[in-house]
Image: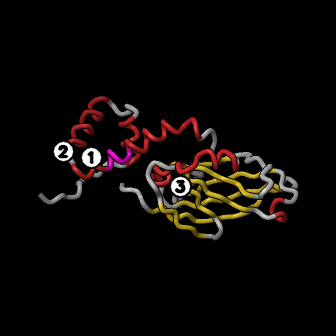
Amino acid sequence: MSSQACASPLSFERFVDYWFGDLPSAEQESLEEHLFVCPSCGKNAEVWADDLQTLGDTASELPRPFLTTEQLAALGNKATVVDVTTDEITVHLRPHTIHVFRVSLDEAQLSGLERLDVEYLKEGVPEPIFHVSGVPLEAESGQFHFACHSHVLNAHGDAKMRLLGTRQGQQFTVLESTMHVHGLAG
């Protein structure tokens, strides 16, 4: 039996609405029936359901989008660390993990910094898809860790990560890197 591509494939965003019961009941039932008869969408739904379940299981381990070195160490093998060192990086997603973007800033970059914010931008989307305000500047090592679950990265795909610093009341770009996201089905 050959598998055919779905004529109207299920998107991750629509699956999330289904998962949380946010669709009208007729649409919820229709989508559920589709998942049982469409091998392609059914397989994607299984992967996404596992990811959403993992998110629920690990939510208490990820209290905020930035982590201290100790919080990162406590995650152990549940975390995949990606060093952001250039203007373009490739992120190979691993299911059921938290991806942590490690950024190292030197003394000159940190000197006089009053504030550090992070935004994630998607081409064609006018507002940031994520924005992290007021990242604590206490990192003695100059390393900062920003966390995101693999299914969230998979849903948004390629994005630009921009670190914004504020010095003497003026905001400026400290670092900008385009993330090319690869790995999960969907």
- Chain part drawn in magenta: 44-48
Asked whether residue 98 appears in the rendered view, the answer is no
Residue occupied by mark 1: 42
Q: Earlier in the sequence, mark 2 or mark 3?
A: 2
Residue occupied by mark 2: 37
Query: Where does residue 154 sit, x and y in percent of width and height?
Result: 45, 54
- The amino acid sitting under disc 3 is Val
Asked whether residue 134 appears in the rendered view, the answer is yes
- Disc 2 crowd rating (10 Å Cα; few below 14, some 14-19, many 20+) is few
Residue occupied by mark 3: 125
Q: Earlier in the sequence, mark 1 or mark 3?
A: 1
Q: Earlier in the sequence, mark 1 or mark 2?
A: 2
Give the Cα separation between the discs numbered 2 and 3.
34 Å
Query: Where does residue 80 sit, x and y in percent of width and height?
Result: 55, 55
Give the Cα separation between the discs numbered 1 and 2.
8 Å
State if disc 3 and disc 2 touch (CB < 8 Å).
Answer: no
**What residue appears at the point 83 percent right and 55 percent down from the top-left corner?**
113
* 2 vs 3, front mark: 2
- The amino acid sitting under disc 2 is Val
Which residue is situated farthest in the top direction here?
Answer: 25
- Disc 3 crowd rating (10 Å Cα; few below 14, some 14-19, many 20+) is few
- Disc 1 crowd rating (10 Å Cα; few below 14, some 14-19, many 20+) is some
- The amino acid sitting under disc 1 is Gly
